[in-house]
């Protein structure tokens, strides 16, 4: 082990907890991305977190570059968010009636995002599932178009792999999803206008909606080519289909106005429906979908499309989300963006120095590192992303972890920062990078 690793307290506590976890939970984790299957080893069990730092059960500290997979834009245990949450908890945690913070959070979202109405749910999965149901109910059509490599949660119809031809219907991407659930899903290559044109030419009058990550972050960060989202919005409009922009990851994260703030707001188009999650829940299970008033009007109890949830709009979760969004000022995004630029520039320099072929791609404050040959051009879609060297990434990941930096344990994820990533946190990452780059070179 390296000197840095030798000086650390070891990981016996995490190992013991993992053994207990595996005995009672499949794979020892409650969401597969938390496991270390892609990088080897066992995940660290985190006892507490503050600012940019995680502390595991053995007392190791890590700079957190996962940030709960996006939500913790302000860092962990932000004092003002904590105070708002403590105050909400003291007044009871769920009533099953309307509450003031739901209204305030909805107003905040409507003020910032291209939506006229919002409905709260408890996860991003519920948001996309409900948005698709609403799109089908509104249009009276059945077909859904999605892109390969875009993840929208574990909705049956969206856990689909591309069929054998371009505009052919999909096959289930996992056992447990019946063929009938994906038989109405078309899966297309991302950033491919011709494929979209062909799908709409062949099936346009049956397409209820096209759903896309506003900027894909679940195959690593693969930004939409300039004008691609506008093209999607226009194509949908021409064919009477709804354009659903999934901003669960990018919303209030890529920029103050999400990915839409980086393209739609400047280009002058709006999605019909938008899904939100992560940052807007302030670290609690809260998510939402929203959009055009005339479309949202079709939802129960105003309209006939059913959708509901016992804990939807939960007062503690919406209070956390409201506090987070109110604190997420332009200054916060500038701070996160500056730290992201410093880290991605340093990662690229360290990898170049070690002779590791790589590409860094970003959108707003989000970025990811592909260990792939830049001579092959940018990563534009899932096929390109699949070229990344996962074995080299595993070595890179563990070298970073040994030096106190917790990266996503998968080569296909965005790296997330927060406004709490101060000089000490950033320097810890910069110090770890050269050795990790050398580990990736072997
Ligand atoms: N949509 C996108 C773009 C996501 O990144 C995710 C989760 O990572 C989801 C939907 C699903 O959200 P959740 O995990 O809250 O169900």
Image: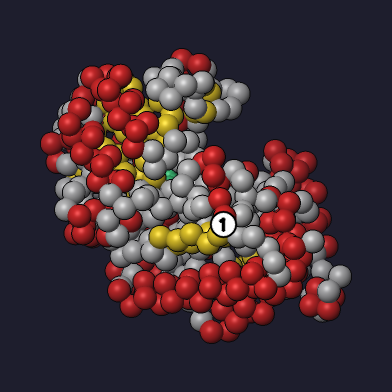
Image spot of residue 67 (x, y percent): 52, 63
How many dots with numbers?
Answer: 1
Q: Residue at x 36, y 71 (%)?
A: 333
Asked if residue 60 shows in the view, the reply is no
135 and 352: which one is in front? 352
Classify 123 as above or below 346.
above
**In the image, farthest residue toward the top:** 180
Within 10 Å of the Cα at label 1, are there few (<14), some (14-19), or many (20+) other Cα atoms?
few
359 and 248: which one is in front? 359
Viewport quadrant of the C terminus: bottom right
**In the image, farthest residue toward the left:** 294
Q: Is residue 19 left or right of residue 351?
A: right
Q: Secondary structure at mark 1?
A: helix
Task: State yes or no: Cβ of the residue under disc 1 lies below 8 Å from any atom of ligand 1.
Answer: no
Residue of label 1: 374
161 and 351: which one is in front? 351
Q: Residue at x 40, y 60 (%)?
A: 363
Asked if residue 358 shows in the view, the reply is yes
Image spot of residue 80 (x, y percent): 39, 74
Classify 116 as above or below 434.
above
Q: How is the image coloured?
A: secondary structure
Q: Quadrant of residue 113?
A: bottom left
Q: Is residue 182 left or right of residue 38?
A: left
| The quarter of the picture showing ligand 1 | top left
110 and 16: which one is in front? 110
Q: Is residue 114 left or right of residue 400?
A: left
Q: Residue at x 73, y 51 (%)?
A: 391
Q: Is residue 58 left or right of residue 162?
A: right
Image spot of residue 236 (x, y percent): 23, 33
Q: Residue at x 27, y 23 (%)?
A: 201
Q: Quadrant of residue 272?
A: top left
Viewport quadrant of the N terminus: bottom right
């Amino acid at each position: 082990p390296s000197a840095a690793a030798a000086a650390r307290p070891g990981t016996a506590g995490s190992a013991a907890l993992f053994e207990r976890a595996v005995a009672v939970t499949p794979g020892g984790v409650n969401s597969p991305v938390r496991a270390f299957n892609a990088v080897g080893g066992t995940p660290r069990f985190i006892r507490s977190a503050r600012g940019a730092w995680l502390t595991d059960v053995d007392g190791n500290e890590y700079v957190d570059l996962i940030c709960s997979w996006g939500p913790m834009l302000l860092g962990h245990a932000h004092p003002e968010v904590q105070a708002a949450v403590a105050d909400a908890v003291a007044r009871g945690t769920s009533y099953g009636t309307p509450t003031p913070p739901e209204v305030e959070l909805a107003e905040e979202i409507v003020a910032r995002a291209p939506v006229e109405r919002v409905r709260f749910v408890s996860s991003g999965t519920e948001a996309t599932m409900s948005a698709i149901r609403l799109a089908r109910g509104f249009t009276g059509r059945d077909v859904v178009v999605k892109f390969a490599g875009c993840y929208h949660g574990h909705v049956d119809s969206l856990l689909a792999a591309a069929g054998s031809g371009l505009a052919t219907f999909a096959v289930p991407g996992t056992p447990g999803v019946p063929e009938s659930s994906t038989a109405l899903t078309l899966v297309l290559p991302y950033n491919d206008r011709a494929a979209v044109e062909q799908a709409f030419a062949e099936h346009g009058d049956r397409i209820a909606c096209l759903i896309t990550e506003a900027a894909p972050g679940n195959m690593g960060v693969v930004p939409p080519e300039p004008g691609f989202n506008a093209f999607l919005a226009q194509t949908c409009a021409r064919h009477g289909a709804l354009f659903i922009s999934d901003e669960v990851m990018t919303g209030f994260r890529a920029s103050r106005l999400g990915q839409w703030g980086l393209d739609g707001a400047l280009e002058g188009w709006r999605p019909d429906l938008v899904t939100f999650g992560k940052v807007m829940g302030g670290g609690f299970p809260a998510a939402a979908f929203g959009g055009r008033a005339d479309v949202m009007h079709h939802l129960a109890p105003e309209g006939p499309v059913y959708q509901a949830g016992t804990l939807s709009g939960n007062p503690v979760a919406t209070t956390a989300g409201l506090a987070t969004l109110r604190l997420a000022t332009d200054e916060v995004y500038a701070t996160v963006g500056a730290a992201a630029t410093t880290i991605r520039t340093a990662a690229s320099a360290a990898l170049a120095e070690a002779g590791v072929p790589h590409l860094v791609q970003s959108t707003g404050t989000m970025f990811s590192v592909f260990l792939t040959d830049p001579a092959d051009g940018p990563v534009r879609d899932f096929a390109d992303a699949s070229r990344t060297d996962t074995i080299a990434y595993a070595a890179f990941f563990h070298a970073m972890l040994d030096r106190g930096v917790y990266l996503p344990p998968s080569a296909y994820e965005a790296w997330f920062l927060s406004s709490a990533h101060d000089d000490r946190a950033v320097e810890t990452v910069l110090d770890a990078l050269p050795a990790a780059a050398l580990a990736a070179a072997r």
